[in-house]
Amino acid sequence: MKFIGALDQGTTSTRFILFDKDGAIIASHQIEHKQIFPEPGWVEHDPWEIWKNTSECITETLRKVDATGSDVSCIGITNQRETILAWNPKTGKVWHNAIVWQDLRGAALINELKETVDLQWLREKCGLIFSPYFAASKIAWLLASIPGLRVAAEKGEVIFGTIDTWLTWNLTGGKALVTDVTNASRYMLMNIQTCQWDDELLSLFNIPKCSLPTIVPSSGVVYANTTSDGPFKTEIPVCGILGDQQAALFGQACFTEGLGKSTYGTGCFLLVNTGHKVCTSKLGLLTTVAYQIGSEPPVYALEGSIAVAGSLVQWARDNLMIVESPQELDKLAASVPDCGGVYIVPAFSGLLAPYWRSEARGVIAGLTGFATKAHLCRAILEATAFQANDIFEAMEIDSGIHMTTLKVDGGLTNSEPLMAFQADLLGIPVVRPLVVETTALGAAYAAGLSIGVWKNMGELSAYWKEERRWKPTMSESIREKKSRLWKKAVSRTLNWISVDSEEVES
């Protein structure tokens, strides 16, 4: 039997998963990588560590089922989006650590542009809003800060690529320098209508077009084959790429306008399919490309992004040290009926959708002598549900689509109190699929479609199966009270630092 391989490169770890034709997981291996924090608000990754871990994950996964590269029919890639790095595609020289999507070092430039560039123009151009979250300001920072980089970039000796580009380049021995349309839509440099690099946006950030990868469809194309001296030891088509959140939408079979999903991982991301129409948000959501199959028109989505979700649980374990594991936190949270009046807003790197306030910083509000460790644990989980609810409300207003259920995936969906509370806040059922690794599954689907493992999207839809459903039980009055207190806590995070000055966070 031939397997379909999916490489899932995330913010905190890298995984390689083998799927069979029915979308079932056969084997996988996962390795965490180091989070580098050079300054407050700065986050970096070592790109060579990521490639080393990628190779090891592939080797170990194959070993677990006594398989070789010849047993793999194709490879799909899904990746943390907006994270950017610069390297010489001829020599492999890396100019700087990868600057991670959470990183805020582009905030000064973004705030300058806010004063002179019309936001509506930007939204209509690229579907995004002014934020250091996206890749453009990170590239501009690299060009301005690294000696010799601009000269090399203008000579065509540098590629500014997201992690999908980096992995594809390594896997194919430099034959492919591509990024798919979903990742390209997160640069703030791609025209959302034409799905090509936009000259006006490139000029705005002073970025040479020759330093960017070629934009390709998410599926329906073989970009290049792996090399025989790489981790697979043979040639395998690399033929599917999707940014992680679009991959989860794809893996959840949200192929019809109005279908949406929420992924609960390091961050939390809610997307709803809006079909072939570009839906511009008035409430702080993003317009993004959901996927593109071959030469077909792209499918779009509205998206709301939350920076801190699962990483808040990690923070409670590693920094607060109030629990030793996510399972212990979950158990403590379930031991109390509510948060005891405690609200945690984890604005560690500012607030993303729908607020987009990079100067905000986290708060714990409502503390009294009554609050226990269990109440803190519950407030940690509830913070993610509150943030998702903010996005959900904006999404329904912007799209005009009334969602009757929400498909969910990601590691945090294993939290019973979180999922039950999420259903209560939304007032609709929350549904988890049988295969929760939908991000990797979406990448596998995209690759398999490209070479005929699956014939069409309808065949993929038939594989989706429900595993668990949470129904709302909370009264409307309690829901309104909790939401009101949450918004009050959010207001306390704003204007904590001045992003226009050199104010030091200490």
Image (cartoon, helix red, strand yellow):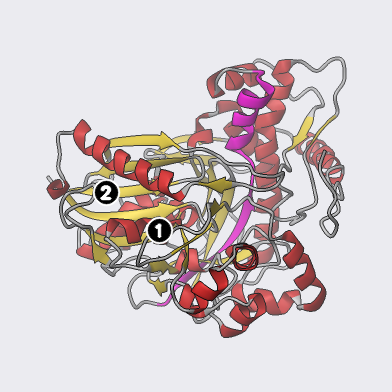
Q: Quadrant of residue 148?
A: bottom right
- Dot in front, 2 or 1: 1
Q: Is residue 471 magenta?
A: no
Which residue is nearer to you in this view: 67 or 467?
Answer: 67
> Residue at horizontal 30%, vertical 44%?
55
Tag shown at residue 166: 1
Crowd around label 1: few <14 · some 14–19 · many ≥20 (10 Å): many
Q: Is residue 314 magenta?
A: yes
Q: Compared with residue 431, is residue 370 higher up or lower down, i.e. above or below? A: above
> Residue at horizontal 30%, vertical 36%?
28
SS at badge 1: helix
> Residue at horizontal 48%, vertical 63%?
183
Q: Quadrant of residue 192?
A: bottom right
Which residue is nearer to you in this view: 401 or 56?
Answer: 56
Residue 472 in the image: x percent, y percent? 63, 36
Q: Compared with residue 185, is residue 472 higher up or lower down, i.e. above or below? A: above
Amino acid beneath label 1: Trp
Residue 349 in the image: x percent, y percent? 71, 47
